[in-house]
Amino acid sequence: MCLAIPALVKSIDGLQADVEVGGVGRRISIWLTPEVKAGDYVLLHTGYAINIIDEAEARETLKLLEEMTSQS
Amino acid sequence: MRFMDEYRNAELGKRLIERIRNRSTKPTRLMEFCGGHTVTILKHGIRQLLPPNIEMLSGPGCPVCVTANADLDKAIALARLPDVIITTFGDMIRVPGSYSSLQQAKAEGSDIRIVYSTQDALEIARRNPSKSVVFIGIGFETTTPTVAASILEAAQEGIGNYYVLSLHKLCPPVIKALLDSGEVRLDGIVCPGHVSTIIGSRPYHFIPRDYGIACVVSGFEPLDVLLCVDMLVAQIESGEPRVEIAYRRGVNPDGNQRALEVMAQVFEPCEANWRGMGKVPGSGLSIRKEYRHFCAEYSFKIELEPPCEPEGCLCGEILRGIKTPADCKLFRGACTPEHPVGPCMVSSEGSCSAYYHYGEGDGR
Amino acid sequence: MEDKILLAHGSGGKLSHDLVEKYFVPLLKNPLLDKLDDSAVLELSGRLAFTTDSYVVSPIFFPGGDIGKLAVCGTVNDLSMSGAAPLYLSLALVIEEGLPVADLQRVMTSIQKTAEEAGVKVVTGDTKVVNRGSADKLFINTAGIGLIPAGVDISGSKARPGDKVILSGNIGDHGIAVMSQREGLQFSSPVESDCAPLNKLVSEMLKVSSRINCLRDPTRGGLASTLNELANQSGMGIRIEEDEIPVQDAVRAACELLGYDPLYVANEGKLVAVVPEPDAKQVLATMRRNQYGARSDIIGKVVGEHPGRVVMSTHLGASRVVDMLVGELLPRIC
């Protein structure tokens, strides 16, 4: 399982946050990621942020993909 | 959309496929455990693009598909109680239980509402204080913490009319049961993505250690799945199975500690009934005593008819990866998305539904 | 006049009469309606296209339109898809007791504006009021009549191998506009329904080509279902290119958030045309000159293989079947 999509945190309000996916806004719960800050990207699943996306790792993965496939 | 579009790059995808073709020499059997991965693979035609020596099997990672008829019957029985509002994820509405479905119960007058989140269910509870709002809790470790959080939130706020029917299940025990059954020989497992976001990658260590099977945790975009297959191929070709994470932007080895704590605070492991696998110890979650007043089974008296399974339905074997939808005599005949016999045809990520909808691209 | 619709407004007595005189006639003013006879008497000759539809959308007001605009466009478009020039509409309302009169007025004004744009007349109508709870605010039923010009023969069964499949613009706008209203999504720039009357677009297309084989508007069930219908009716296969199908970014994002596939989301101002290859370029150019076809593109072709099936070339270069929508469009959580 499951559909979880990357969402940008715009603002925090207690244990809720306003996030955006491709310009579309939604109010979600950050009960499971209370340490999140505005500007972080989170994985959004059924109305909750289930984790904070590791942006450095994201860049690394893309770099790895580019490198791997340019050698072969 | 950031962190999604980049992992759909066609050029990189084609090159990755080329790389896999060059490196994969042995006959390779991979199982994608998670229904979401099955959908990505079929939606993007990945099975066609992989070399013929790589076989991909779909596993039991579809929480709707593995919900036993007896459990669905409980949900339907609750729906028929007076002054009950059932809140559920959309996936469950059409699944046939032993005698009926939530969709049918709705047509017969039950108040059944599709929600996107337990947050919606809590809001319905707040707005309908004279009714009992029951949330049908399905899902693995990705979803369960959100349900646990909703119970904690209800407890904190003093919401007295919110209940959860816990049909939640855990992945690692069922992977073990599947491997122990010895029915299916695997070389590698595409490990669940967002389940691992919560539980981390450590719980899979028993797989290479005890069974010699390669494990890589995968994301859900096409490049994520291809990267995962590439890493599995590397392990298999070198004969060195271990646990690796391909989905590093979403998963770390320890998972989300807070989510695990919240889950443990509200739920405890119990035996669960998996369609196609029967009873698997320690693979389900029940609500702890301290939160019993949120448990639908504890709070409501329901009477159930003995459950029955539809004849000829191969959902069980399909879920265990030992048969494919094409092997089922009912597939595309008596069992279609319009009139499904078993859950694998109804759930949006059930194997049968995915194979039916996405076909194999050659017009079949 | 009261500010809410009462049961009495539907009973045929003075209040009903007032409702018609005050809200319907002045707005929809035309010689046929003004007579207020039990039937409109029309004089027509030629091949007639005749259609009927009911509209039950909820909410009744959404970004880019409302149930009234939808009713007129839907009927006009059904007629246009047969190649007919739409002429006359009937309009029957089933109103839930308690609907604010201001809402009814708003809907009627919308009907008037849309009818004017499309150049059609509402010539006969009916109003019923039902008990609270027996209807969801407002249901509308229409019937429409149009004339098919000589030499025009459009049908879903006529698609032939080699024909090009042309789509008139972005998909998913209407469904998302309505859904977003229901689900409380906030857009930095709201997605508006694409609800529009397509009769003028169609007549321009028919002027440049007399060989257009099929026209269909991808409403409920979305583009995927419509293409499947065409494939089934004609006994042909259809191949489309994922990369050629236009979807607005905001619609894509909303679909990800809500768990929908844009291929299955409803449209109310788009059409699919199946055109023999020699005429395709010209038809496309004509479509792009019309405001409702500015983003038209060729998205695929008709083939002899896999009859009745629609197959899509994916972004990655593989193929997959695009099936018809089954049941209701349900959000995917997993």
Image: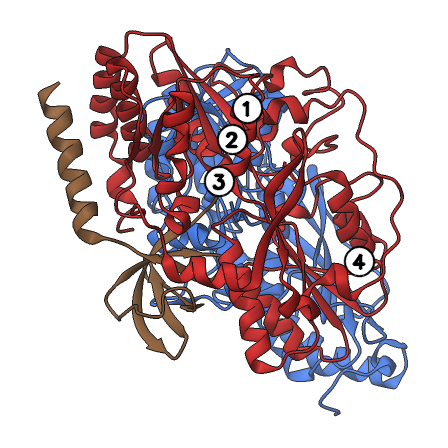
Comparing marks 4 and 1, which lies closer to the viewer? Answer: 1
Q: Share a chain, discs 1 and 3?
A: no
Residue C327 in sight in this render = yes
Q: Which residue is drawn at the image coordinates 25% and 17% (left, top)?
A: B20
Q: Disc 3 designates what residue? A: C263
Q: Amino acid at mark 2?
A: Lys
Query: Is the Cβ of the residue at disc 1 closer than 8 Å to that at disc 2?
Result: yes
Q: Which residue is drawn at the image coordinates 70% and 70% (left, top)?
A: B293
Q: Amino acid at mark 3?
A: Leu
Q: Chain of mark 4?
A: B
Q: Residues within 10 Å of mark 1 (few under 14, many from 20)?
A: few
Q: Which colour represents chain C?
A: blue
Q: Disc 1 designates what residue? A: B180
Q: x and y percent of residue A58 in the render?
A: 21, 46
Q: Share a chain, discs 4 and 3?
A: no
Tag on residue B78? Answer: 4
Q: Supply the letter of whichever chain is brown.
A: A
Q: CA distance from mark 4 to mark 3?
A: 35 Å
Q: Which residue is drawn at the image coordinates 69% and 79% (left, top)?
A: C23
Query: Is the Cβ of the residue at disc 4 closer than 8 Å to that at disc 2?
Result: no
Q: Share a chain, discs 4 and 1?
A: yes
Taking depth in this image into account, of A41 and C161 the one nearest to the observer is A41
